[in-house]
Amino acid sequence: MLLLENGHPVTDRWSYATEGEALGTGPVIVPLSRLSEGLGRSAGELGVMLPVDESVSVLRGALPRLSLIVITFPVFRDGRAFSQARALREHLHFTREIRASGHVLPDQYEFLVRCGVTTVEVPDNTDLPVWDRALHQFRVAMQPSVVNEKPTGFGLRRFLPA
Amino acid sequence: MSADTMIREEVVPVNRQVGLYAYDQVDRTFLRERIDQFRDQVARRVSGELTEDEFKPLRLMNGLYLQLHAYMLRVAVPYGTLASRQVRALARIAREFDRGYGHFTTRQNIQFNWIRLEDTPAALEVLAEADMHAIQTSGNCIRNVTSDEFAGAAADELLDPRVHAEILRQWSTLHPEFTFLPRKFKIAISGSPQDRVAARFHDIGLIARPGPDGRPLFEVFVGGGLGRTPIVGTKLRDDLPEEDLVAYLEAILRVYNEFGRRDNIYKARIKILVQALGAEDFRQRVDTEFSAMDRARYRLEPALVQAIRDRFGVPAFEPEGDAPALLAQARKKDRAFDAWVRTNTHPHRAPGYLSVVVSLKPAGGIPGDATAEQLDLLADLAERFSFGELRVTHLQNVVLGHVRQDRLYEVWQALSVAGLATANIGFITDIVACPGLDYCALANARAIPISQKLSSRFADLELQREIGALRINISGCINACGHHHAAHIGILGVDKRGEEAFQLTLGGSGEEDASIGQILGPAMSEDDTVDAVARLVDFYLVRRNGTERFLDTYRRIGTAAFKDVVYAPA
Ligand code: HEM
Ligand code: SF4
């Protein structure tokens, strides 16, 4: 698994909690069912996986302690996680990393980022230039987003960052 | 060059077009970049890097369907309005990439049924040169926004809805959050109390009117639709202010995206969600979202709306003069012309003008088909007589919006030569039909041949005038693309032990008295169905009161009597 940020591979300092094992002290991503266990740790950064059929509000109380939220696409056609990412930013004002996991296509990269996603997990054998191009191919969008791109001064249009 | 510098170069586009939003360089750049993306996707599909399953939603985003025999390209006609040069571009696509014709649909779009996958990027280039595209004409996204074919012209209109249709077109175009919805999403908008867009049969239907301070207010209907489960939409708002239009639609779409069903495509439309939750619960969820969201981000300031409005050309009407008198003279001299004026024109708000409906339903013809030559002629006529503007109707005809009454005779003569002057608008042969089994992989039965048989059977215009307003719609299967539920007489193709057969539905209407047609009885063969329609019409002619329409007689007398006419002939 590779991790992309802004179109390029970056080192992933996080690890997913292993079932049946203690959480350790490093940066760890827990399933929602182990959230309170994670919050009970005395040290170490905490990330959580938000199931696609959960409302983001289940994370409200834990939010100040979370450094990372992982959203999931069971299949690329299932667009619910776009709304989850947007709601985390817009309703819960979450400012740290949102990571997209599961089945996503490069052609969705721009949409993910505009909904507030920071990083994307992609397969090891993926064609990296395709992802980079998919993100930087476009210079304008036709509507505002939670990323607050610069208005073009006409209509609802926005300039996408280069 | 960055988009930043481009917008400074061209603040207001020079070529404003009547009835249509004028693209600037930013809009054009946007289209170019998206075509480049699609060319890249086609290449990745051809190389095998994309599976068909992965390629499908991407090609659908670009209007490319795989049909029975070939790919079909569906081109968006925003709010149904086309400029002459765009009509010529469509004619060129028909000629160069298809078999010489195109097909107008009930959603005011045009389809080309014989496109090769490898040719699609080139066809999209031709479209882009004319500021057109096929984005979001299919797929589970917000589809092309439809509007009133008499927008900006109708005497009964309160507000030209196309400015807001354009705002919604822009807002919904490649919307990052709403491009992978549970199912497709259709929005229609009208600015007339006379609902000509079937607002109550759309995922969202909007009816605009000016408020007390002159700023627009919107009635909002949600969860209407046809298909397998026909439902008349629920009214969510009576007086949504203009500034909140986009924010409120965002809220509806967010609720739908989160809660709409994804496990069964037949239960995935928003209408099913509204029914499952109940109108009140659904409204509450929308309101909760609406009050929690950052509304300022989506606010439509008056200046923003005005800037979009300024991109629309406005027709410079000439004074009435003696146009009505000259028209009256011509009508007196030529009875065929007089009959055509009576059926194929619509009252205009400007004195001395009329809107003309050009029938794409000649006797025995295929509803909605237009050849490249006819398209070129329509482009010429629009240029000469209607400020270069042509509209597509949701009944598969086209409209010249603003024709001076003293030029009407010339228009009629030119149309007659091209076989485009059939005086049958609103009559029994003004049939709507889906592509059916001739093209569509989902079909049970062919919709086109039965439509042609009915059209031939009732070809006599005297007879049609005698019958009066009667709407026939035909769908080749339960998906109801031909809107048979919304027709006075609906015809539905079904599979009867491997044979093509047809069911009749009676009493539907897509207008402000919206209702859903009721199934009359068991399915019949094509010829028996045509005979049954003829018997229904005869019965109506005998039983009607005065000038009652077929629909009114049916509503008054009830199903049983009509059923006997079909199934228990004396
Ligand atoms: C091969 C071509 C086509 C296919 C495969 C297709 C497929 C479908 C399907 C599956 C539905 C049901 C969707 C649902 O309600 O969940 C549907 C509905 C519909 N389609 Fe098509 N269609 C095709 C062509 C057309 C054409 C040519 C038109 C217009 C003439 C059209 C306009 C519509 C409309 C208006 C509905 C009504 C459903 C609603 O809005 O509630 N489609 N189509
Ligand atoms: S109604 Fe059925 S047959 Fe007709 S176009 Fe739609 S899916 Fe095809």
Image: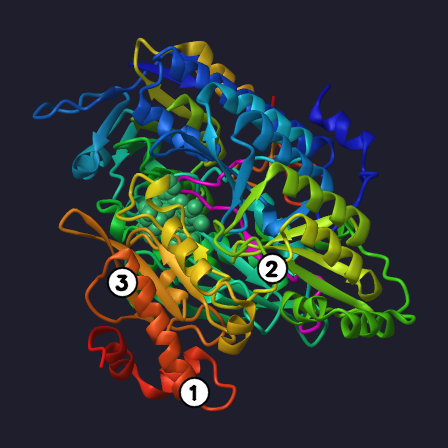
Residue B544 disc label? 1
Residues tagged by mark 3 and mark 2 found on one chain of the structure: yes
Comes first in the chain, label 3 or label 2: 2
Tag 3 residue = B528
For disc 2, the chain is B
Quick check: can you spot residue B1? yes
Q: Position of residue B557 (x, y in %)?
A: 33, 87
Q: Position of residue A128 (x, y in %)?
A: 42, 11
Q: Where is residue B504 in the image (x, y as percent from the top left)?
A: 29, 66
Residue B552 disc label? none
Q: Is residue B148 magenta?
A: yes
> From which residue to which does the magenta span run?
B134-156
Quick one: label 2, few (<14), some, or many (20+) residues within 10 Å? many
Residues tagged by mark 2 and mark 1 found on one chain of the structure: yes
Q: Which amino acid does label 3 sit on?
A: Asp
> In this picture, is B159 found above or below A65?
below
Callout 3 secondary element: helix
Q: In this view, does B91 lie to the left or right of B366?
A: right
Q: Which amino acid does label 2 sit on?
A: Thr
- Looking at mark 1, is its residue's CB closer than 8 Å to ligand 1? no
Residue B422 disc label? 2
